[in-house]
Image (cartoon, coloured by chain):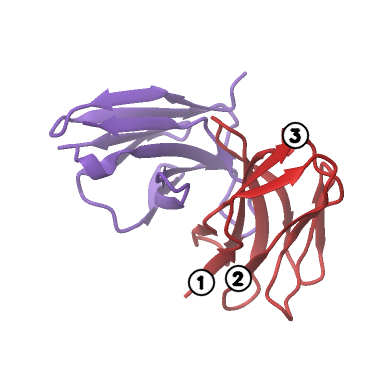
Amino acid sequence: GNSVTQMEGPVTLSEEAFLTINCTYTATGYPSLFWYVQYPGEGLQLLLKATKADDKGSNKGFEATYRKETTSFHLEKGSVQVSDSAVYFCALARASYDKVIFGPGTSLSVIP
Amino acid sequence: DTAVSQTPKYLVTQMGNDKSIKCEQNLGHDTMYWYKQDSKKFLKIMFSYNNKELIINETVPNRFSPKSPDKAHLNLHINSLELGDSAVYFCASSQGFGPSTEQYFGPGTRLTVT
């Protein structure tokens, strides 16, 4: 079946450190891939997405590239800030009228 | 203005009670969802409505019943609450239901069953 796997958290980084959160997926066909972010006490919000192989999604300094050959969509940011502390969810959607499948989430804490 | 709103934000109740959570979106979207997030932050879809029609109905107890009076509202009614129902429930909406569709989430309702 379709699934999303993420690196386990929590991840703790110092401010200005480089961030990578690994995400791999299993799906038939060509799914769309997403990263959602959940700040403390809030609902999820879309951070970035990519809809086909080799697409790069980017937003707020975060980037992720859709790699079909490795079925991955790793999230990266060159210099994290305290305000980036949140839970990050990788997700996929395979086709119309199909549910979005979320990964288990990775908690990130950035310390000054 | 809040795009997707839920009421109440917190709900504490006893086992066996019946409760409802309301959701409203003012984005003009035609698709709405209910998700359950457990204590480990794992998020799972429960239901989805498109133009007031049920299109996703995951394997949830039939004690859970969604109701969509119009495209802007999707309420969740829960009968005979159990301890295991304690979680954060998120409502979300989107325009359409394609694979690249962005979902907009409400702030969540934290349900605690004692």
Q: What residue type is labelled 2?
A: Tyr
Return the x and y of residue B38 as percentages of the image width and height. Answer: 40, 46
Which callout, 1 or 2, points at the residue further toward the start of the chain?
Answer: 1
Task: State the mark number for residue B11.
Answer: none
Give yes or no for contact between labels 2 and 3 (Cβ–Cβ under 8 Å): no
Q: Mark 2 points at which residue?
A: A25
Residue type (three-letter) at the residue carrying disc 1: Asn
Q: Which chain carries label 3?
A: A
Colour of chain B in the rendered structure image: purple
Give how far across and how far down residue A54 sits, in percent.
Answer: 82, 70
Residue A87 occupies quadrant = top right
Q: Residue at x 24, y 29 (%)?
A: B19
* Disc 1 chain ID: A
Q: Identify by letter the chain in red.
A: A
- Where is residue A77? Give x, y as percent: 82, 50
Nearer to us in this view, B110 or A98: B110
Determine the CA span between mark 1 and mark 2: 7 Å
Separation of disc 1 and disc 3 at Cα?
A: 33 Å
In front: label 1 or label 2: 2
From the image, tell me which residue sits under label 3.
A82
Establish whether labels 1 and 3 are both on one chain.
Answer: yes
| For residue B30, above or below residue B61 | above
- Residue B24 is left or right of residue A112, and the answer is left
